[in-house]
Amino acid sequence: MPETIRKLSYGEAVNAALHRLMEELPETLVYGEDVGVPGGVFGVTRGLRKQYGERVFDTPISEAAILGSAVGAAMMGRRPVVEIMWADFSLVALDQIVNQAANVRYVSGGRLAAPLTIRTQQGNAPGACAQHSQCLEALFLHVPGLRVCMPSTPQDAHDLLITAVHGDDPVLVVENRTLYFGAKEEVSVGGPVRPMGGSRVRHEGSDATVVTWGAMTWRAVEAAQALALEGIGVEVIETPWLNPFDTGAVVESVRRTGRLAVVHEANVTGGFGAEVVARVAGAGVPLQAPPIRVGAPDVRMPAAPVLAQALIPDAHRIAGEVRTLVRGAR
């Protein structure tokens, strides 16, 4: 597809990627709850049904049926892109994701694949409460055979979805609902398909390394900018692909800075931050201070927006934690 530049929001970039995929790959299907005629609960799939007809359709409220049919369709040569409206609801279909999709290559001796993409969104939003606000990436990262990514920009929201659907493994593309209607940016909606994996430095510094992903990226950058005014240099590394994960880039950064903080919106206990810390420790990187993890406490998310926001790391809290990491307790 020839490269063109369009100014798009995060949600619009996902929509543009779906249009491109439907045109490029005739085997692509898009379906899920309310994705067809209504155009998605956040409007992300708007216009697809009108343009591509029965390749885009609505389903009953049954995540197990959505995922089970997608595994079968993928094994038979289709490339389904299915939407699970809230990441929390993927738990209803764990058997289809973990025991079926992730196992197709292994149990068929490599004769079959499941090129299936699961789009979902997570993260806290006002009034979301406990059953609509869980961050579950670590759960799926524990499962061999699943790829997982979390875009934080309109460009990545477009590119990572294109990469996921062109691949031959099941991929979870975890979007963040707080980003859907953010500021518009220039997005390339054509050009080559990018490979999976990789990371990028969002802010340079030499006193500490902060590793993060998804919506926390911009809070970590804001914290790094504030600390720079105090003379503390923070290198912020964003890892939009969590599997495959760019361990090498993280290890190289921590070797230079000597300090590590991992920031994620998910609960601290059992979060993927622990895996990042373990990989750095396993690489034998000498640290000047114990590594830290900054995330949500181990509580259910309250419905009251002011209480929920108090639990999610913000730039002020991230800056405070990293300041202590660099300067020590006061």
Image (cartoon, rainbow, N blue to C red):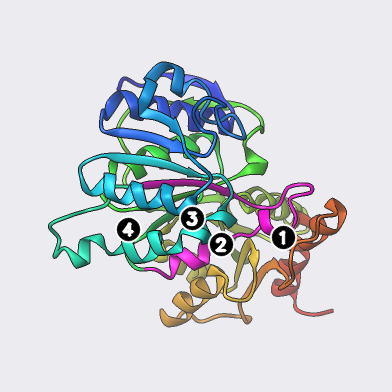
Q: Residues within 10 Å of mark 4 (few under 14, many from 20)?
A: many
The amino acid at mark 2 is: Leu
Instruction: Say whether residue 256 is left or right of residue 4.
Output: right
- Decide if residue 190 is in sight here: no
Q: Nearer the viewer, mark 3 or mark 1?
A: 1
Q: Could you say which disc has been placed on residue 101 in the image?
A: 4
Q: Residue furthest front?
A: 60
Tell me where residue 201 appears, x and y as whole percent: 52, 51
Image side of residue 89 versus residue 23, left or right: right
Disc 3 marks a residue whose amino acid type is Thr
Of the residues under marks 3 and 1, which one precedes in the sequence? 1
Task: Please give the label number shown on residue 239.
Answer: 3
Confirm or deny contact between disc 2 and disc 4 (CB under 8 A): no
Q: Nearer the viewer, residue 100 or 62?
A: 62
Percent across and percent down for residue 266 are 63, 63
Task: Calculate the distance from the C-alpha at mark 1 to the C-alpha at mark 2.
Answer: 13 Å
